[in-house]
Amino acid sequence: MQKMKILIVEDAETLRNELQEFLSNYGYEVEAPDDFQNIMQYAMQDDVHLILLDINLPIYDGYYICREIRKNSEVPIIIVTSRDNEMDELMSINLGADDFIAKPYNTQILLARIENVLKRTYAHQQSSILLYKSLKLDLSNGTISYQHQQEELTKNEIKILHCLMKNKGRIVSREEMMEYLWSSDLFIDDNTLSVNVTRLRKKIESIGMINPIETRRGLGYILA
Amino acid sequence: MKLQRYIKERAIFLSMNIFLFVLVAFFLWLINVQAVVMIIVFVCWFGPLLLSYGLEFLKRKNFYDDLLQNLEALDQKYLLPEIIEEPNFLEGQILYDIIKTTDKQMHEHVKKYKDMQAEYRDYIEAWVHEVKTPIASSKLMFENHKNEVTKGIMEELEKIEGYVEQALYYARSSSASKDYMVKEFSLQACISKVLKKNAKAFIHKKIQLQLTEMDDVVYSDEKWIEFILHQIIVNSINYCDNKISLYTRKHEHSLILHIVDDGIGIDEKDIGRVFDKGFTGENGRQYRRSTGMGLYICKLLADKLHLGLTIQSTKGEGTEVQIIFPKSKVVLLES
């Protein structure tokens, strides 16, 4: 799959660098220019998939940049700012921004928002089918299939499997898993997670696959 | 204004006149003047005197009665100078000028403090926004270099973030200006945001969350509600045993959001004062350091937004906070 490219327009240097590192760690290609005089040139590049835009900037402010971009591009824009009253949010959305996040953001929430916006914009280009060995997870209709057998999953189960598949070969701790679920509006507790994982295993086994989800005691789950 | 008191004040002058008249009458009687002449003298003397007193009394009575009536009718008594009419007699005019001058001075004085407060508020707001950027970058730094130490610092940093937020909303709540924006929004979405913000705490403390599906829309300022909910939920997380539930109940004129925890509860003698400024109560002192500002600010904001905010608790069993969103008839008709 092609890497998504994110442009960070942010004037605080530390934040810019850390954000760049953070997003790179999560598999995005990141560009973070510090030349605000020519910022529009960066924004108008064709291969940018998403722009994270601050409002308080030197030379041009974020609103201006947002408006200018919208004049000839539909690239998704997420406004990231420390000014967080209703007025700023409304203004951003009116100027054509796709989302609005207040600083200091929770990093999980930031990732979830970025993912959402990208999914919304590039859904048709991205395949919604994830594959692990020959287990297929189809996100568009919420089913798993294995050798022509199909089974429907619940919302929780889809997210759990999705999380494991994205991190295949790596141990995902229960806390990490729950944080991921919470960031997608699924507010489950410890017991529910255990129950859901058990159900998910049964469903996978019911379509003929040997249980692929291993429990590592005291560490978490892994799709080995 | 009573006639009696008016006359009383002029009693000396009047009695002097009467005394003089008696003296003159006695003198006239001595030189055998006819009674008719005496009556004419009396009429000529007292007629104009009483008439002028009467007219003057009426004039004053009109002015002062008007003034008192206006004062009575005004909610904000200090607005009286704005509606006072200029009287057409001397003392009245002097009083009028004095009131106008002091009023003007008072306005300038009040304006000075308003400006000072606005300036201070602007500074706090700017400062809070300023400080959020370093907090955001520190959080990212920790995220990029995770280990046991940074995990601890991260938690502390989140506390700082909470206090910074409190300062911002305190500045907003206490200012005279109306800088909130009422619009329609989904309560569920707002609650989701707050829950996500506190996800780590919920997961870490293994708290069971019971969240009923809600389809309610409310009319208020979303950011402010988010802040209020955050304060209440953070309290619940701190004090609960292992369960927090959120649900709404529809009533004829209101929608009530219930936030219930199964924690240590609040002592009966403390519960009336939880919304007071700086009140920490036994729980605050025993369990963790508390500034006593959170709920106080919530109450201020709720009052400004015309929301109800109540708290009930049974010691040892739990606490329930209710946020009451009023529904106007218009809103009811629409929905």
Image (tube, coloured by chain):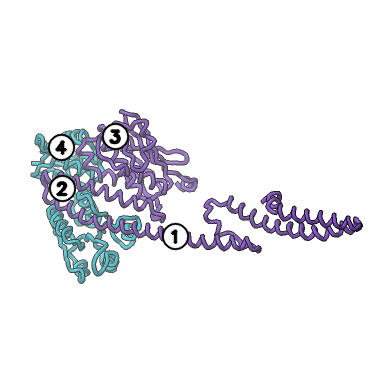
Of all chains, the one bearing label 4 is A
Callout 1: SS: helix
* Residue bearing mark 2: A130
Which marked residue is nearer to the observer: mark 1 or mark 4?
A: 1
* Residue bearing mark 3: B283
Q: Residue at x 70, y 54 (%)?
A: B10
Q: How busy is the neighbourhood of tag 1: few (under 14 within 10 Å), some, or many (20 plus)?
A: few
- Residue A171: % across, % down: 10, 42
- Residue B24: % across, % down: 83, 57
Of all chains, the one bearing label 3 is B
Instruction: Determine the CA span between mark 1 and mark 4.
Output: 76 Å
Q: Is residue A197 left or right of residue A102?
A: left
* Residue bearing mark 1: B109
Callout 2: SS: strand
According to the rendering, which colour does chain A have? cyan
- Camera-side residue of B166 and A7: B166
According to the rendering, which colour does chain B have? purple
Q: How busy is the neighbourhood of tag 4: few (under 14 within 10 Å), some, or many (20 plus)?
A: many
Instruction: Determine the CA span between mark 4 and mark 3.
Output: 49 Å
- Camera-side residue of A6 and B67: B67
Q: In this figure, what is the number of numbered marks? A: 4
Q: Amino acid at mark 3?
A: Asn
User: Is the residue under label 3 in contact with that under label 2 (CB below 8 Å)?
Assistant: no
